[in-house]
Amino acid sequence: MKRIKLLIIFLSCVIVSSCIPHKDTIYLQNKENSINDTIPNNLIEVQKPYRVQINDILNVKVKAIDQKTVEILNPSGDSNLNASSSERAYFDGFTVDVHGNIRIPTLGYVNVLGFTTEEIEKIIEKKLLDEQFKETANIFVTVKLAGLRYTANGEVGSPGSNVLFTERVNIFEAIANVGEIPVTGDKKDVLIIRQYPQGQKIHHLDLTDINVMKSPYYYIQPNDIIYVKPLKQKSLGTGETAVSSLTTIATVVSLITSSILIFSRL
């Protein structure tokens, strides 16, 4: 009788420890135990302006009253009409070289490393007015990143690289575009591997905490790597829920019992 009780206690402990807690699967929880059904305080989004890095691709457009005078500065975009948006951005855009420069027709090399796109617009506009045009030409320059490329690995639906043609992408949008995090993924410690001039740094995000929206890493940047670790339950090979864990344990116990009965009859 004692052995049966011990077996039941053991199985109960295994079931409890092998199940993934419900709270670990829910995003944006209010962990301050507030009874309100709304966010207690307005969460201020924190996003520092992105500064251009080596290997970034910039889309530069120049407009003027007489558009023919700036045609050489604007890529035609029809060299390969069958190319995808990302491919055309690669071929028509201006890639930042290892020295932090882009090469623009008639202007030559322009250093853009460490500048924001707004600052680069002013740099190119000033250079054009100083060297080629007058104020009356009404030069208008726009500079944008040619897509926001990032990579997602680990416990996500579709690991790999992705390009989104937008200026702002938060961590939830980025993950949603690669197939969501399954139950076996660790939402409490998602890694953001980010490139800096000094090298790479790893940042941690808890997606189950609503305060993640205050994090300076809530918005991803070009060339970020998102890594979602597997939970220990997946490493152990146990069930994701109590029912699946119980099924696994019942199968093992049945196998052991059958083996004992067979060997006892020999």
Image (cartoon, helix red, strand yellow):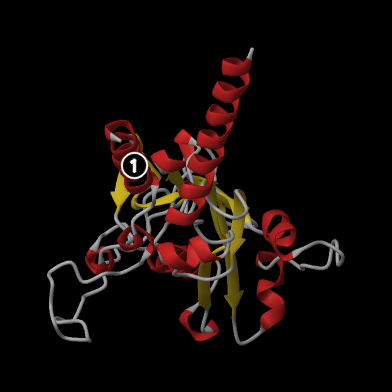
In front here: 111 or 10? Answer: 10
Quarter residue 199 falls in: top left
Furthest residue toward top: 266
Q: Residue at x 83, y 68 (%)?
A: 78
In front here: 36 or 11? Answer: 11
Residue position marked by numbered label 1 in the rendering: 8
Quarter residue 168 falls in: bottom left
Indicate left or right for 120 with 9 as reference. right
Could one spot residue 161 in this view of the protein?
yes
Q: For the residue marked with disc 1, what is the amino acid?
A: Ile
Q: Residue at x 53, y 30 (%)?
A: 257
Depicted 119 relative to depicted 14: above or below: below
Quarter residue 260 falls in: top right
Q: Residue at x 48, y 54 (%)?
A: 222
In x, y percent, where is residue 170? 41, 66
Count of labels shown? Answer: 1
Q: Residue at x 72, y 55 (%)?
A: 91
Location of the N terminus (image quadrant):
top left
In x, y percent, where is residue 32? 12, 69
